[in-house]
């Protein structure tokens, strides 16, 4: 069996999505509820920030690998025209989701989110908002993944 660069990119792309979105789901549906159960409301944001630091570097690496491999496959396969076709809506969904996380991880967090979390005047409200944002992004990621897998395999 011969592996070409496109196949390797696809394997890396799927692995990066598993690490990235799997991590988001773990944080959203395991870590955040555990914090909610074990920490006082005013301490939840600080607890999350402490725990999240361990996943932040991984999330950044997975998001970069997903973007790089996705771009490589699009360029290598000359798939740009698919972005103009309605049937490939899931490509737009993948790109939009990736952009949202890229902006959050590489722009918003370093510029102001980390500082806001560390010095929040309303930690209870900010934690609830962060949970809600994670929940919405998790559902969007699930729908995007389902659409992408169905589309890539000709179901859509």
Image (cartoon, rainbow, N blue to C red):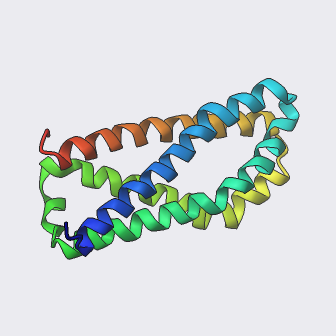
**Residue at the front extreme?**
1
118 relative to 137 in the view: left or right: right
Q: In the image, what residue occupies the spot 81% across and 39% down?
A: 123
Q: Position of residue 10 (x, y in %)?
A: 30, 62
93 relative to 87 in the view: left or right: right
Q: Position of residue 30 (x, y in %)?
A: 64, 32
Q: From the image, which quarter does the C terminus lie in? A: top left
Q: Is residue 113 above or below residue 35?
A: below
Q: In the image, what residue occupies the spot 77% across and 54% down?
A: 116
Q: Is residue 33 above or below residue 63?
A: above
Q: Nearer the viewer, residue 18 or 41?
A: 18
Q: Nearer the viewer, residue 59 or 122?
A: 59
Q: Is residue 38 above or below residue 66?
A: above
Q: From the image, which quarter does the N terminus lie in? A: bottom left
Q: Quadrant of the rendered structure where residue 42 is?
A: top right
45 relative to 148 in the view: left or right: right
The mark total stands at 0
Q: Quadrant of the rendered structure where residue 104 is?
A: bottom right
Q: Position of residue 139 (x, y in %)?
A: 44, 35
**Residue at the top extreme?**
37
Q: Quadrant of the rendered structure where residue 133 is?
A: top right
Q: In the image, what residue occupies the spot 34% across and 53% down?
A: 94
Q: In the image, what residue occupies the spot 28% across and 54% down?
A: 92
């Amino acid at each position: 069996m011969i592996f070409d660069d496109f196949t390797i990119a696809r394997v890396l792309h799927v692995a990066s999505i598993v690490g990235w979105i799997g991590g988001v789901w773990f944080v959203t549906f395991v870590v955040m509820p555990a914090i909610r159960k074990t920490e006082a409301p005013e301490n939840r944001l600080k607890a999350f920030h402490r725990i999240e630091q361990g996943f932040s570097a991984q999330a950044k690496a997975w998001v970069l690998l997903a973007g790089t491999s996705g771009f490589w496959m699009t360029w290598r396969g000359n798939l740009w025209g698919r972005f103009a076709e309605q049937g490939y809506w899931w490509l737009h969904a993948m790109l939009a989701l990736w952009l949202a996380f890229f902006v959050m991880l590489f722009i918003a967090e370093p510029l102001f989110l980390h500082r806001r979390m560390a010095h929040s005047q309303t930690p209870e409200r900010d934690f609830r908002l962060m949970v809600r944002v994670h929940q919405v992004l998790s559902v969007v990621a699930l729908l995007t993944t389902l659409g992408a897998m169905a589309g890539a395999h000709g179901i859509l």
